[in-house]
Image (tube, rainbow, N blue to C red):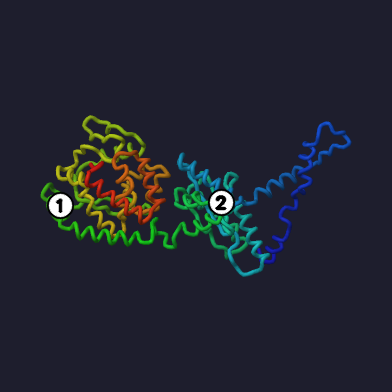
Amino acid sequence: MTTDRLMQESARPMFAAMPSPATVAAPHAAALAPHHAPASSRPRLAAVPLDAVSAFLDAADRHALPANDFLVHLRREVRRSTRSGAALSVAMYRAAPRATGGALQQLAREDATLEALHHAKRETDLLGHVGDDLLAVLCPDTDAAGIATFTHKVDALLAQVDESRAGPEMVASFPDPLFQHLAEARGPAAARRLVDTARPASGDAPTGYPVKRLLDVVGALTALVLLAPLMAVVALLVKLGSPGPVIFRQTRMGHGGRPFTFYKFRSMRVDTDDRVHREFVARFVAGQGGSAGAANAPQVAAAAPYKLKSDPRITPLGAFLRRSSIDELPQFFNVLKGDMSLVGPRPAIPYEVEHYQTWHLRRILTARPGITGLWQVEGRSRVTFNDMVRMDLRYIRECSLGLDLRIMAKTFIVVFRADGAA
C-alpha cells in the first residue's frame, strides 16, 4: 500500500458505522423515565440496528487500554502466573516510529499499529498503552513460542503497510524481570522509564549498583591475599586426608541461567552417588520436609533446612571444613572471574532448577549468585525453600552498597558461631 493510499485510508472516519451518542443513549433515557408519566410524554424507544451496535462494540475493542488500567491487569496476571505457574508473555511496539512525513502520516502509522495488534491478538489478550508512545499486548497462557508466533503475525501485517517498520521494541515471557519492573511501576511515566532501563544494551548486566563489581574485585583480591596461608594448609590437609583432587568442581547456574564451574575445597569422598542429594533437593523444593525416606539414608536437619545432616559421603576433615565454612574459600576465584559476587542469591544446581516453579526462576535470572546473602545470614539451613527464594528476591529488589556491607558484617558473626552450618 502506498503512502498516499495509506493517508487516504487514515483520513476516513474510523467509526462511520457507529451510532451517535444520542441514539445509543435513547433506550437508557427511556428506561429511566418515570412510570407515572403520561404515555404521550414518555420518550419513544429508538430502534438501534444490531449491526450498528456491533460496530460500536468492535470500535471500542480496537482502542488500547490506558496505561494505568493496563498495569492493573498486568499485576493481576503476574500474581496468577506466580501462584499457578501459568505461562504469560508480553510484546511491546512503538505506536508510531519516528520517520519523515507530516502529522497525517504519523497518525496513519499509529492507526496501522493499532489495527495490526488488534487483528493479531486473541480475545483474551489485553492491548494497552505503556507510556505515551509504546503499546503492549499482554498474552495470558502464552509461552515464548506462542509470543514469537504472535510477533511474526504482527510484523507481517505491518509490513503490508510499511516495509521499513522494525519489529517489536521488546518481547518477554514470565518470569522475565520486565514483568517485575512493570508490576512495580506507579503510573505510565514510571512504567515507560522502567521499560527503557529494564534491559541494558548489553543484555548481560545483572541487578546491582554502580560500584558492586568494583567491591567484588577488591574484596575477593583482599581475601585471597590475607587467606592464602590458610588455604595452602587446607589444600595440603585435603590432599593427605583422602584420595582425590583438592578442589571440588561442580556446574552451577549463574546470572541469566548460564552455567559456570563452581569451586570448593573437596569435603566428600570421590566417586560417590549423588542420588540421595538429588532426591532430597526435589523434596525440599517441593516443600516436603522430614527424613530422607529410608532407614539408612542421611537424616534431614530440623525446620526444613537446605543441607543434609550426617551425610555419609563427607570425610571427617570435610565435616570440619563445612562447619567452619572454610570449604567456601575457593569461591573468591569465582568472584574474580565474574561468575559470582560477594553477596547474592545462593548458586543453584542444575538438577535443583529442574524442580523450580516459574516464580523461583527469578532468583537466577536477574542477579549474580553470591558467596553470602540474606539467606545465609538470616535463615541459613532453617527456612523453607520458598522462604529462601523470597529472601533472594527481597535482596534483588533492595540491593545496595549499604545492604551488601551489612550482610558481609553479619556473615562474619554467622561463620564464627557456625550457625546452620553442616
Side of 105 relative to 150 (left or right): right
Residue 259 position in % (x across, y down): 32, 53
Callout 2: SS: strand
Which of the two marks, 2 or 1, is nearer to us in this view? 1
- Which residue does the numbered mark 2 point to in the structure image? 137
In the rendered image, residue 6, in percent from the top left (x then y), is placed at: 68, 63
Q: Visible in this render: residue 155? A: no
Q: CA distance from mark 2 to mark 1?
A: 57 Å
The outermost residue toward the bottom is: 100
Query: In the image, is residue 80 above or below residue 235?
Result: above
The residue that appears at 40% across and 53% down in the rendered structure is 366
The part of the image, by quadrant, that contains residue 210 is bottom left
Residue 194 got which mark?
none
Task: Indicate the amino acid at tag 2.
Answer: Val
- Inspect the image, locate mark 1, and give the three-letter code of the amino acid beneath it: Val
The residue under the point 69% across, 60% down is: 10
Determine the secondary structure under disc 1: helix
- Residue 43 horizontal/vertical position (percent): 84, 39
Can residue 93 be seen here? yes
Q: Residues within 10 Å of mark 1 (few under 14, many from 20)?
A: some
Q: Earlier in the sequence, mark 2 or mark 1?
A: 2
Quadrant position of the C terminus in the picture: top left
Find disc 1 in the rendering and name its residue. Answer: 234
Residue at the spot 44% in from the left edge and 62% down from the top edge: 201
Position of 324 compared to 151: left or right?
left
Q: Nearer the viewer, residue 45 or 34?
A: 34
Question: Measured along the vertical axis of the image, is residue 196 above or below residue 271?
Answer: below
Cβ–Cβ under 8 Å for marks 2 and 1: no
Q: Quadrant of the N terminus?
A: bottom right
